[in-house]
Image: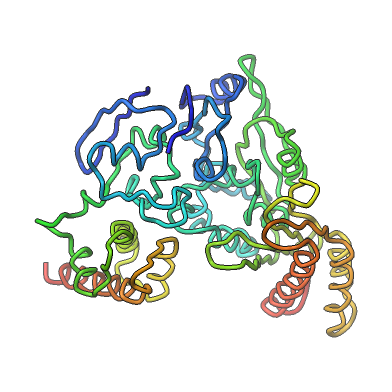
Amino acid sequence: MYLDLQTYTRPATMAEALAQLAAPGAAALAGGTHLNVHGHEHLRAVVDLQALGLAGVAREGAKVRIGAMTALTGLVAADLPAGLAALGQAADAEKNRAVRNRSTVGGRISRDRSNGRVATALLGLEAEVELATGGPDGVTRVDLHIASRLHDVATGAAHGVVTAVRVPADVRWSGYLASQLSAVDAPSADVAVSAGPRGVHIATGGHGRGAAGTLALPTTAAAATALLANPPAGDSWRAALREVAVAELPAHGDALVSGDYRRDLAATLVIRLVAACLAAHGGAA
Amino acid sequence: MIQFEATVNGRPVRWDIPAGEFLTETLRSHGLIGTKRGCESGDCGACAVLLDGVEVNSCVLLAAQASGHDIVTIEGIGDARAPHPIQEAFVDAGAVQCGFCTPGMVVATHALLADNAAPTRDDARHALAGHLCRCTGYVKCLDAVELAAERTAAAKGGA
């Protein structure tokens, strides 16, 4: 198997990388696990980011900074705060170990097809994305909310090189849950939920393209999040949450599942995950 | 063409390769045909090799990305004249039928035992997930991982 690449480069600095990426038909190369899976016949040049020192996980004040080239197995093995469990759960559920050893956090939020589980977890944790932009005249750092980044990727408007993501270190608990047709399939729907000082956040995702050709992006279920901030007494929050989740979630269908099925599945996963997290953390959001 | 320089099975190599070639093809075109060409999408595990000691699917890795690194293929783990204990365990456990998936499974087991000398059945299952076998039904493969771990531990204990 070959790609019709004319050049492969491995720059030593971000300024070099950005200059090389300005060439027509050039793309940034992280782990590369997606390169052979879908059609990338248009690519003529790849700029390998492996020499830029973008891997690693570190605490930075009230945030945890995860370098863009951190492999998913590195994320699973990282000494993350317990409240960030959703990240490890999502990373560990991606495909298989050999792919997780190469697939990177930055790559999972830069793909032009589907973003996958880690993107959903990052959205559920209200992550920030750190980008490097610019060129020969200098490198500028830009911070974006994860939702903006995913939207830009889906619409072809993404720019710059992802250098890291940052997630709040003070999240009290979080979790991730997915449903797929078989163990080797991408999820038909997945959800991530987190609770912290800024409230409860719920994100849902699913692979594939919607009927109108739009990506089934991870979506923040704002009304469901608001409901959980002041949940009804007893167990009635389950029915209330299903109602608002179904009303709010998009119905993107694709070759895997219909839009209605995906929406209903996501609502069910949200309820199951919230119930499991509440049970594990003393019933308090 | 670009120049590929790496250590393959302990030997430094310098090969001219197309920039867009994936590592499976590079290895196979240089005689290392134990690395199998399977799904070519990172799903079946037949092409697994060790890159700096870590298991990767060579079909979804541009060879150029592996330049400058240490690569071990199934031939570097053991061969018919000097089989590795993991390979012997796969034979003795009856985990080899057509054999197409076996190199990848042996590579995965090698990576697992390097990290975890006493894996549980679940650890073994987790490690072999992503290695598809159409012959054995996987039970014998999991038995082989356990047998390899026992023999490796016994050999270390006796050393």
Closest to the observer: A190 or A62?
A190
Image quarter of the C terminus of chain B: bottom left
Q: Is residue B104 above or below residue A142?
A: below
**Residue farthest to the left?**
B81
Identity of the residue drawn at 83% across and 61% down: A249
Identity of the residue drawn at 26% across and 68% down: B96
Residue A22 position in % (x across, y down)? 62, 20
Q: Is residue A277 above or below residue A124?
A: below
Displayed quadrant of residue A265: bottom right
Residue A215 position in % (x across, y down)? 74, 48
Answer left or right for A280 relative to A147: left
Displayed quadrant of residue B22: top left
Which of the colour schemes (rainbow, by chain, secondary structure, one colour) is used? rainbow
Identity of the residue drawn at 53% across and 25% down: A44
Residue A110 position in % (x across, y down)? 64, 41
Answer left or right for A156 relative to B82: right
Answer left or right for B87 relative to A54: left
Identity of the residue drawn at 69% across and 31% down: A159
**Residue farthest to the top?**
A137
Image quarter of the N terminus of chain B: top left
**Residue farthest to the bottom?**
A234
